[in-house]
């Protein structure tokens, strides 16, 4: 078997062809739909495997600390492939490590610690956790080589996924089958890998049952109760579950929380400041009919995590794996390929799409084809994308900072103006304003309600249906080269919702503190003519409503409010409404 694989591998090394160095122009790169992401190279599954009938799955990366060479570790149904991408437009297959059991699996996962790769496979009895010394790639001469593992941890028979905390040297095998040491519920099976070739069982967390995926970190977020401790954020099928695993012999549940219309909590990743956790649900799009849904969790208090908001994409594809880096969210959304979101306003519950590369051109439907995962952490800026059907893509961001100012809302007479500003050095082809309601995007057309829908300034008649709750707007700007820049969404234009940044309101109303934790105070000048206040949340729901006609000062208790952004609407004797934002921490 080994000799056969080796001979086929050499043949594939001689024969495979790389599609490379194709910029994204007019929304396409070598036939793959794209937006502000250039294709650097593409290797299909046959070239990667050296044989047919093989599909792709997981992906990770390793950078040789001595040579600086970057390597892609690409999972396939029959094993793992090691690819040298030191010249990204000409990737070289160094070798392959077959499945330990000799059997194929559509679920294979790989992570890296201290120059070693750790590999698991699901529904693959006898596979265990493979350990491979990546420094062996330095000495490979007759590429591609068929490698054997350096060690195998047999404390599990098979497993769905592996999570590694590189700071501490512990691996967390999840979704394990045939697990020993009384750790057989499919939760966190903890292994000490500080001596990589001699992995040792260290502990277990399975009080909340099966864990599908996780991220484990040394916590340095804002919750002082847990700073410095090792914490795991787990996707546990129907909940987000947070565990304290600092003491491996005595792990404990911190909290768990479900969410509306959950179908299968699949995976998630923390923002770099560890204040927010971004997660996905693998079956909600397919079972319920959502467009791609991304859940944003406020985890600043680990004992009481809260769902801050839900972001819906314009496509209906199923989301799979996501990672965060530099205020960006890198999503592998099956049939839509790689989608990059801007997370710079995540505290406000506001995301926008920055760029995309569609590795599965036939459609964007709710099927299990296309991109499985991505690896955005190479210092070179190269991003690896694994595709079930089409193999490995190497791409690079080419994002243009087109929109300078995102939607600003101003009330004028009986109209509302929503405007953006763009960098005029770009050649703008067109503008298109969209309405977002219930997660659905609709292009606006000019008429009795909307005007200037194809300019940078949208006008809305205030006595129109656009004033219904949960209505927001965004603008898509298309450049002459086909690139598309999308704005953040506007604030909610719910009933009685008018944003007015005039100086009169600032003069007559003071609100402090802001942000607020437990309570804040409103002081109103007697000359303001303000008669009432209303507080609404991001969903447009009323939290509080009261009169201000006979009082000038009001203290509002916010202990029971969920963390996030709120709006205070001030109404005057003239019937005018004015708005101020407040943040609840």
Image (cartoon, grey):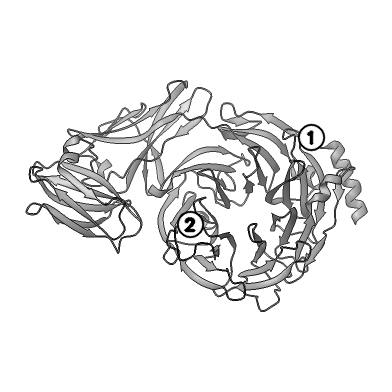
Please rate how many residues cluster around mark 2, counting C-alpha atoms within 10 Å: few if below 14, some from 14 to 19, many from 20. Answer: many
- Drawn side of residue 112 relative to residue 283, left or right: right
Q: Which residue is nearer to you in this view: 303 or 224?
A: 224
As drawn, the label of residue 61 is none
What residue is shown with label 1?
A: 17
Q: Which residue is nearer to you in this view: 454 or 256?
A: 256
- Drawn side of residue 483 relative to residue 38, left or right: left
Q: Which residue is nearer to you in this view: 576 or 522?
A: 522
Q: Percent from the top left, x then y, of residue 8?
A: 88, 46
Q: Percent from the top left, x then y, of residue 571?
A: 15, 46
The reply to whether residue 371 is visible in this rendering is: no
- Drawn side of residue 33 relative to residue 401, left or right: right
What residue is shown with label 2?
A: 221
Query: What secondary structure is found at the residue carrying circle 1?
Result: loop
Q: Percent from the top left, x then y, of residue 440?
A: 41, 45
Q: Quadrant of the C terminus?
A: bottom left
Q: Percent from the top left, x then y, of residue 261?
A: 44, 61
Q: Is residue 480 above or below residue 14?
A: above
């Amino acid at each position: 078997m080994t000799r056969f694989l080796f001979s086929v591998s050499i043949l594939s090394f001689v024969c495979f062809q790389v599609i490379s160095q194709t910029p994204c122009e007019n929304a396409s790169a070598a036939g793959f739909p794209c937006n502000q992401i250039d294709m650097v190279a593409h290797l299909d599954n046959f070239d990667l495997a050296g044989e047919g009938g093989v599909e792709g799955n997981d992906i990770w990366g390793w950078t040789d600390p001595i040579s600086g060479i970057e390597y892609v570790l690409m999972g396939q149904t029959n094993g793992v492939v090691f690819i040298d991408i030191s010249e990204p437009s000409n990737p070289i297959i160094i070798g392959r490590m077959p499945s330990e059991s000799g059997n194929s699996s559509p679920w294979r996962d790989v992570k890296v610690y201290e120059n070693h790769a750790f590999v698991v496979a699901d529904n693959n009895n006898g596979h265990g956790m493979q350990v491979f010394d990546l420094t062996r790639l330095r000495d490979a001469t007759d590429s591609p080589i068929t490698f054997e593992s350096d060690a195998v941890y047999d404390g599990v028979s098979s497993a769905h996924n592996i999570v590694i905390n590189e700071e501490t040297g512990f691996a967390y095998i999840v979704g394990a089958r045939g697990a020993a040491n009384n750790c057989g519920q499919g939760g966190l099976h903890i292994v000490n890998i500080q001596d990589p070739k001699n992995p040792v069982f260290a502990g277990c967390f399975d009080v909340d049952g099966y864990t599908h995926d996780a991220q484990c970190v040394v916590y340095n977020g804002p919750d002082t109760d847990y700073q410095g401790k090792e914490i795991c954020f787990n996707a546990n099928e129907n909940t987000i579950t947070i565990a304290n695993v600092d003491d491996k012999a005595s792990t404990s549940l911190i909290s768990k929380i479900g969410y509306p219309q959950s179908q299968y909590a699949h995976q998630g990743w923390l923002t770099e400041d560890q204040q927010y956790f971004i997660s996905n649900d693998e079956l909600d799009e397919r079972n319920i009919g959502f467009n791609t849904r991304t859940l944003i969790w406020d985890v600043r208090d680990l004992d009481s995590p809260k769902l801050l908001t839900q972001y819906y994409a314009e496509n209906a594809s199923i989301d799979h794996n996501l990672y965060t880096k530099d205020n960006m969210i890198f999503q592998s959304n099956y049939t839509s390929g790689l989608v990059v979101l801007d997370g710079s306003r995540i505290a406000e519950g506001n995301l926008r799409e920055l760029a995309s590369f569609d590795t599965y051109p036939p459609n964007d439907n709710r099927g299990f084809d296309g991109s499985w995962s991505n690896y955005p952490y190479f210092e070179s800026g190269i991003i690896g994308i694994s595709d079930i059907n089409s193999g490995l893509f190497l791409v690079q961001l080419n994002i243009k900072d087109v929109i300078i100012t995102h939607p600003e809302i101003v009330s004028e007479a009986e109209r509302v103006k929503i405007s953006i500003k763009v960098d005029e050095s770009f050649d703008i082809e067109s503008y298109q304003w969209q309405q977002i309601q219930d997660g659905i995007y609709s292009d606006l057309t000019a008429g009795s309600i909307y005007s200037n829908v194809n300019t940078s300034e949208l006008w809305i008649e205030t006595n129109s249906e656009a004033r219904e709750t949960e209505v927001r707007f965004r603008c898509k700007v298309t450049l002459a080269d086909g690139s598309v820049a999308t704005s953040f969404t506007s604030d909610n234009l719910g009933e009685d919702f008018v944003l007015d940044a005039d100086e009169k309101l600032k003069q007559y109303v003071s609100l402090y503190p802001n942000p607020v934790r437990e309570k804040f105070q409103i002081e109103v000048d007697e000359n303001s003519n303000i008669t009432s206040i209303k507080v609404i949340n991001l969903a447009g729901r009323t939290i509080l409503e009261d009169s201000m006609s006979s009082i000038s000062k009001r203290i509002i208790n916010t202990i029971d409010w969920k963390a996030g952004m709120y709006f205070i609407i001030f109404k005057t004797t003239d019937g005018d409404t004015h708005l101020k934002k407040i943040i609840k921490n």
